[in-house]
Amino acid sequence: MANSTSKPVIIVDRLTARFGDNTIFDRVSFQVNQGEILVILGGSGCGKSTMLKHMIGLYKPAGGKVWFNEVDINTDDDRVLQRVRMNLGVLFQSGALFGSMTLAENVSLPIYEYTDLDSATIDLIVRMKLGLVSLQGYENHLPSELSGGMQKRAGLARAMALDPMVLFFDEPSAGLDPITSVELDNLIKSINAGMGTTMVIVTHELASIFNIAHRVIMLDKSAKGIIAEGDPQELKDHSTDPRVVNFFNRRPATGPAPQGR
Amino acid sequence: MAGRGHTIEVRGEQGQHVTFAISGPIALDNLHAFNLETQALLQKLLPAALTVDLAGVDYLDSAGALGLIELESQARNRAITCELVNLSDKARGILSLIDPQSLTLPPLLTDRQTGNLLERLGDETLRIINDFKEVLIFLGELLGALTYALLHPWKVRWQDVLFYMKRAGVDGLPIIGLISLLLGLILAFMSSLQLKQFGANIYVASLLAIAIVKELGPIMTAILVAGRSGSSFAAEIGTMMVNEEVDALTTMGFTPVRFLAVPKVLAAMIVVPLLTIYADLFGILGGVIVGVMGLDLTVYTYLKETQRSLTLVDIITSLIKSGVFAVLIAGIGCQRGFEVRGGAEAVGSATTSAVVAAIFLIILTDSAFALAFHYLNI
């Protein structure tokens, strides 16, 4: 287990996200500590995925900053930015593997780009990464020849290609059966424990959350920000906020739903 | 961890027990150097036993761990007993994740076979035959759907037809006008250079009128529409295939061809003949400009001569021709879209193939029309 006093890898400082006139969240601050598994959760439309995309620098914030290892993720300095990007790996919701490339080519792409290793060594690294996600032997398969769970794992192998400091997961268990989903959770845990990689996971799968999270942050649509933070079990049992309790206990909100449509 | 290297301190004599005391990081950045250095050291020292002391290693990633495993296996290959000592908990964790077996396992699929020349030739032939079959099947489906639309006009999505008429027609006006005007200018200019020598200036008008109205107008318009709209139809339907939108339509009880292809084909059938007339006018305008500026003809004589050399039949056959082109362009565009399987790359190749096939078919049908008209004395 990560201890919460270790130094932060990512600091989100008064981040505001806005699409047109629609403010998704307003002045949200939190931090991600070294080696922990942080889960960002919340109901649909609360801005979880938007938060993730801000944290990896795909979206420009309407206000506030995201600091990655003391570097502003939206810096204009291309060399710094490249350094930052090498240190973060992202597993997208659908895997986002390149359909025209084999798994080996998908995984080796960033390694060829960023290192001067010879192809035999890269080949070995690729085999190791595929082995890490239990896809040994699948080097020459195309993504379309794999099942959904395997595609996710292959996406994870690619995200880990450069041994990033932080791995981001967008809905890792979306579209997976319960067993495959648990397997992926266990894989995430074992990589976190073995390599000490910091992980930021966006999900609303309760089972997953209780299984893997060291700490959770709960976003809410109407509050436009964080409404709870801490250990998931603790929140479930002791939170006084009805929105949090309802979420963890799978109860639809009763009474007038705020901003409900 | 960036930019820093490792150092290896060697303790022990050549051929005896040797210790590598490694300090600094072993990571992806310096893996290459690390591998080279350890190999060279092993080669040089040929130790009887090797101890790798990792006490000084402050950063190890999975690539670095792989380097250590490689070092071990190389030592083993040289019959050197090798031992890793003073591993940190973190290093132990990473090493435990790596399954050495996975490194040597042969791939489940060997490299994709491309086959020899004969095999590829056969494959390609089969592909072309298959492709032709698919096109015919689709053509049948399309004609069925068009007949259905004719009998049940209220079931056609006219909103979509209007939308595609705007996209394929109105939005194409500037480029088609410009190209036709330039084509008319060039053609008139080049032929005037020759005809001037015989004092046959006035025949530039009839030459241009016949060339533009009978052949170049319909063909140029069709090629431009194929490039602008045939490709966009293929890309649109192809992306819908990738996103399973077409499957969704099918499960909702729609016939994809009727829902997606018919409005596009109808729009093209209405719009392409109109664009052809428009292109003809601009082509002739190009001729007028050359005639008036270069050949001392008046606008009236030029147009009079143009009118004299064209019959109504010429114009009608040219419009029928462009109507057929329209069906081909829109049809092949939709068909290539429906063929898309897989992802982004397939959409790209469908788009290319839609344009190439459309242009090929346009030229082919145009030749067929030329022969037919000749023997029918039209």
Image (cartoon, rainbow, N blue to C red):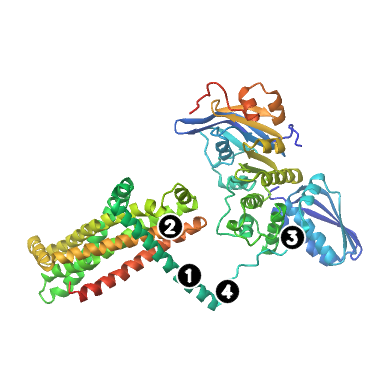
Mark 3, secondary structure of its residue? helix
> Is the Cβ of the residue at disc 2 closer than 8 Å to that at disc 1?
no
The residue under label 4 is B115
> Residue flagged by tag 3: what amino acid is it?
Leu
Q: CA distance from mark 4 to mark 1?
A: 15 Å
Q: Marks 1 and 3, how far apart in space?
A: 38 Å
The chain under label 1 reads: B
Q: Quadrant of residue A46?
A: top right
Which mark is nearer the camera, 4 or 1?
A: 1
Q: Residues at marks 3 and 2, common chain? A: yes
Q: Position of residue B228 (x, y in %)?
A: 34, 56
Q: Considering only order in the chain, which callout, 2 or 3, is on the residue closer to the N terminus?
A: 3
Identity, as a three-letter code, of the amino acid under mark 4: Gly
Give the CA separation, mark 3 to mark 4: 28 Å
Q: Quadrant of the C terminus of chain B?
A: bottom left
Name the mark on residue B103. 3
Q: In the visual, does A188 lie left or right of B232?
A: right
Q: Which mark is residue B337?
A: 2
- Residue B332 appears left or right of A200: left
Q: Chain of mark 3?
A: B
